[in-house]
Image (spheres, grey):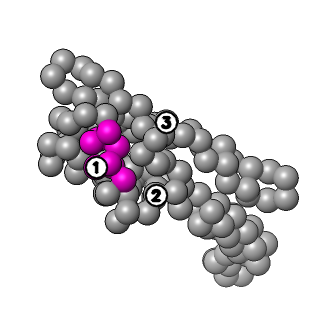
Amino acid sequence: MRKQRGITLMGTIVTLGVLGFVGIMAAKLLPAYMEYASVKKIFRTMVQGGQTKGTVRDIRFSYEKLNAIEDVKSVRGEDLEITKSGNEAVVSAAWSVKVPLVANISACIDFEASTESAQ
């Protein structure tokens, strides 16, 4: 008798179910991580362009100008925390995003970005 090879129907169904679940979770969580990457990109651009050297008002205005391109909804200019470290201003933002997953189950993701890590 020949030895059978291959995948069973039950194995295929379970594999497709797991891949489908992972795909749906990735599709729901991806926009939050894309906004996080956009905020980090804005901070990196601000540091490279020397836009963190002005007044608090100038820094917020620079962020808003760059945010008009990136269109980040979670973090606005007034949400920025601006402190001084030596001769440089440190711009940071911390925010949470609640993403509904299934029925009454949600994922709460905390994000934190700073110009210190953007250098």
* Residue lying at 64% horizontally and 77% vertically, measured from the top left: 6
Where in the figure is residue 46, as x and y percent of width and height?
23, 46
**Is residue 87 placed above or below 48 in the rendered structure?**
above
Q: Amino acid at mark 1?
A: Ser
Query: In the rendered structure, are the residues bearing label 2 and label 1 in contact, judged by CB atoms less than 8 Å apart?
Result: no
- The residue at which mark 2 appears reads as 72
> Could you tell me the amino acid type at mark 2?
Val
Q: Tell me which amino acid carries mark 3.
A: Ala
Frontmost of labels 2 and 1 is 1
Q: Label 2 crowding class (10 Å Cα cut-off): few <14, some 14-19, many 20+?
A: some
In the rendered image, which residue does mark 3 sit on?
A: 94
Taking the view exactly as shown, the residue that stands out farthest to the bottom is: 2
User: At numbered mark 1, what does the secondary structure look like: helix, strand or loop?
Assistant: helix
Mark 3 or 2, nearer chain start: 2
Which of 5 and 8 lies nearest the eye of the viewer? Answer: 8
Of callouts 1 and 3, which one flags the residue occurring earlier in the amino acid sequence?
Answer: 1
In the rendered image, residue 1 lying in the magenta stretch gets the answer: no
Q: Residue at x 52, y 57 (%)?
A: 73
- Image-based side of 37 in relation to 100, left or right: left
- The answer for how far apart the CA atoms under marks 3 and 2 are is 13 Å
Confirm whether residue 11 shows in the render. no
Query: Which label number is shown at residue 62?
Result: 1
Most prominent secondary structure in the magenta stretch?
helix
The part of the chain drawn in magenta is 57-64
Q: Is residue 31 left or right of residue 18?
A: left
First reached walking from the N terminus: tag 2 or tag 1: 1
Of circles 1 and 3, the one toward us is 1
